[in-house]
Image (spheres, rainbow, N blue to C red):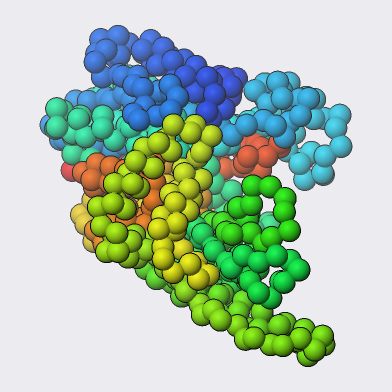
């Protein structure tokens, strides 16, 4: 006989529609609304009426807006184990600007699918307008169906604690789509419960979405661990000149363009581990820093890149990128010199040579140089500058960091063209499940067994891979980096300790192996976002339950 699935599809589908109907767009009041709605729903479960202290709704910490997480736990009665599994998922979604005049439909899946029947959409998309097989709507895939699966399992185990040989923690966090204030705040509660309740966290299961990795890909993917993400940023100074004397200076935009040519889409910067490769970096912003029009070249330029890692540490990434920036700078000067020579030959003008050499500094290196040169005068002035800059609400973390670098550059005596390399945003730590710890081995074995069991009753192939390929809150359940890697993040982020701070010690205190078992669908973050019902509403909760049972077994 094959495995008998829990009949949860209809209930998870109903919960998903309820959650999608709440407009919980990140950085809006909807994040508060969905948290209170979830809290009220869970509080109605008989278990939480009997144990109200097992459920909390908590405001995020050090957040510029008011929003909340919802956390709950069930204490199993099957044995006396303190082993505890964390189920996690985010409540927020991206916006609905792409829906245009149909924005209201984004939160009404049934009506939205009916409306789409009369629209011009591709044949592939139209084939999915089957309400028994697919559900469309903002957040249906990313990731309210995954949250609904977790919610179903929370209710199931709250009604059957005698089937739980250990404990189950449920987290519904806010702000995953922007700054991860939700999960970073939840760490405080997780660590408090660890002390007060004696929870021994042995595994975390995220329920974020999965999608095909290529056209025609039939697989449903489960992921062990997750990709890491950095935002390497570059402040580029040139040598200012009037455009009427173009070769007397060098435009920082010219250097920035060569830097982007060197870094963006460069396969040398794909990080391989366990036979899996990250995508190469790509530029997310490139701009000069002129405030108004004039006929002088810009003083500075600014560019930053998305940068994924599997095994490289943030320190190693800086070393690699510094090398790439030096190559780009040299290439820019070579092209500049060739153009200058050609121009002088054409025009008969005197060639005065190119006076610059490539110079690339880490922010950490520049800061140390300035402390050595100016001592406390520099340190005190920069502290005042950063604190004053905090009053400018228009600056996000990235622009705040840039302003700090610009200010520090003013203290440099040698103003020759330079590239300053730094980090300007949140670091999402990579997580590798290497099997080195007993908890990792237990989770790996539980996942393999669950996939084997479910595959016997599910026709599509289920594949396990090593790194969840999208940015997610999984990153804050554990740290695979050593202290030197984290120190590189702190020392090279100019916003660290003022505009930006992460308690990496709190992550290390949890340090739990994490996997992702999430809903399957297409077009996350797009107008035709949709989730496949059969896999997402039935297979996902069943597989998650199997993993929980196995991980908590003696």
35, above or below 466, in the image? above
Residue 13 in the figure: left or right of residue 161: right
Query: Could you say where residue 317 lies in the image, as x and y percent from the top left?
Result: 41, 66
Query: Could you say where residue 418 lies in the image, as x and y percent from the top left?
Result: 50, 68
Measuring 68% from the left and 47% from the top, which residue is drawn there? 292
500, above or below 193, in the image? below
221, above or below 18, in the image? below
Q: Quadrant of residue 484?
A: bottom left
Query: Could you say where residue 140 lies in the image, as x and y percent from the top left?
Result: 59, 31
Query: Could you say where residue 528 lies in the image, as x and y percent from the top left?
Result: 71, 37
Residue 58 in the figure: left or right of residue 248: left
Q: Quadrant of the N terminus?
A: top left
Q: Choose between 475 and 292: the one closer to the eye.
A: 292
Q: Please state the total of marks drawn on the protein image.
A: 0
Q: Choose between 245 and 86: the one closer to the eye.
A: 245
Q: Residue furthest front?
A: 350
Residue 500 in the figure: left or right of residue 379: right
Q: Quadrant of the C terminus?
A: top left
Measuring 40% from the left and 16% from the top, which residue is drawn there? 39
Q: Choose between 232 and 506: the one closer to the eye.
A: 232
- Can I make out residue 296 in this image? yes
- Can I make out residue 517 in this image? no
Q: Choose between 402 and 138: the one closer to the eye.
A: 402
Measuring 57% from the left and 19% from the top, which residue is drawn there? 22
Measuring 46% from the left and 15% from the top, which residue is drawn there? 37
């Amino acid at each position: 006989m094959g495995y008998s699935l829990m009949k949860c599809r209809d209930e998870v589908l109903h919960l998903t529609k309820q959650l999608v109907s709440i407009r919980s767009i990140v950085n809006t009041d909807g994040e508060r609304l969905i948290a209170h709605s979830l809290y009220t729903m869970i509080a109605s479960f008989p278990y939480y009426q009997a144990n109200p202290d097992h459920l909390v709704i908590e405001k995020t910490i050090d957040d510029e807006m008011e929003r909340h997480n919802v956390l709950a736990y069930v204490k199993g009665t099957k044995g006396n184990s303190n082993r505890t599994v964390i189920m996690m998922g985010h409540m927020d979604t991206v916006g609905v600007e792409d829906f245009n005049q149909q924005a209201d439909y984004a939160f009404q899946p049934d009506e939205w699918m009916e409306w789409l029947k009369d629209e011009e959409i591709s044949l592939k998309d139209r084939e999915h307008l089957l309400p028994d097989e697919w559900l469309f709507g903002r957040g249906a895939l990313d990731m309210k169906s995954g949250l609904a699966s977790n919610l179903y399992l929370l209710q199931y185990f709250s009604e059957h604690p005698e089937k739980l040989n250990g404990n189950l923690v449920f987290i519904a966090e806010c702000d995953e789509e922007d700054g991860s204030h939700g999960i970073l705040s939840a760490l405080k509660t997780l660590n408090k419960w660890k002390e007060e309740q004696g929870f021994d966290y042995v595994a975390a299961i995220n329920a974020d979405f999965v999608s095909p990795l290529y056209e025609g890909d039939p697989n449903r993917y489960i992921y062990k661990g997750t990709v890491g993400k950095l935002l390497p940023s570059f402040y580029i100074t040139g040598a200012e000149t009037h455009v009427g004397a173009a070769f007397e200076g060098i435009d920082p935009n010219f250097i920035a363009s060569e830097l982007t040519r060197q870094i963006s889409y460069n396969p040398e910067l794909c990080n391989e581990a366990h036979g899996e490769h990250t995508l190469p970096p790509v530029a997310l912003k490139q701009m000069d820093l002129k405030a108004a029009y004039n006929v002088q070249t810009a003083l500075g330029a600014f560019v930053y890149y998305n940068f994924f890692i599997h095994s490289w540490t943030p320190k190693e990434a800086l070393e690699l990128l510094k090398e790439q920036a030096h190559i780009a700078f040299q290439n820019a000067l070579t092209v500049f010199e060739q153009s200058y020579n050609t121009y002088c030959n054409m025009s008969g003008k005197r060639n005065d040579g190119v006076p610059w050499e490539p110079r690339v500094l880490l922010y950490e290196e520049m800061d140390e140089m300035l402390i050595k040169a100016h001592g406390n005068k520099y340190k005190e002035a920069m502290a005042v500058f950063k604190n004053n800059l905090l009053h400018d609400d228009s600056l996000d973390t990235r622009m705040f960091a840039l302003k700090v670098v610009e200010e520090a550059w003013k203290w440099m005596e040698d103003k020759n063209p330079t590239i300053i390399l730094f980090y300007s945003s949140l670091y999402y730590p990579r997580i590798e499940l290497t099997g080195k710890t007993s908890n990792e081995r237990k989770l790996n074995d539980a996942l393999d067994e669950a996939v084997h069991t479910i595959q016997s009753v599910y026709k599509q192939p289920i594949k396990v891979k090593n790194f969840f390929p999208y940015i997610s809150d999984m990153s804050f359940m554990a740290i695979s980096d050593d202290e030197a890697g984290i120190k590189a993040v702190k020392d090279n982020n100019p916003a660290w300790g003022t505009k930006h701070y992460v308690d990496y010690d709190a992550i290390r205190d949890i340090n739990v192996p994490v996997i992702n078992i999430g809903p399957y669908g297409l077009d996350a973050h797009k107008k035709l976002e949709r989730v496949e019902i059969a896999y997402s509403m039935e297979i996902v909760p069943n597989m998650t339950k199997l993993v929980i049972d196995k991980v908590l077994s003696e």
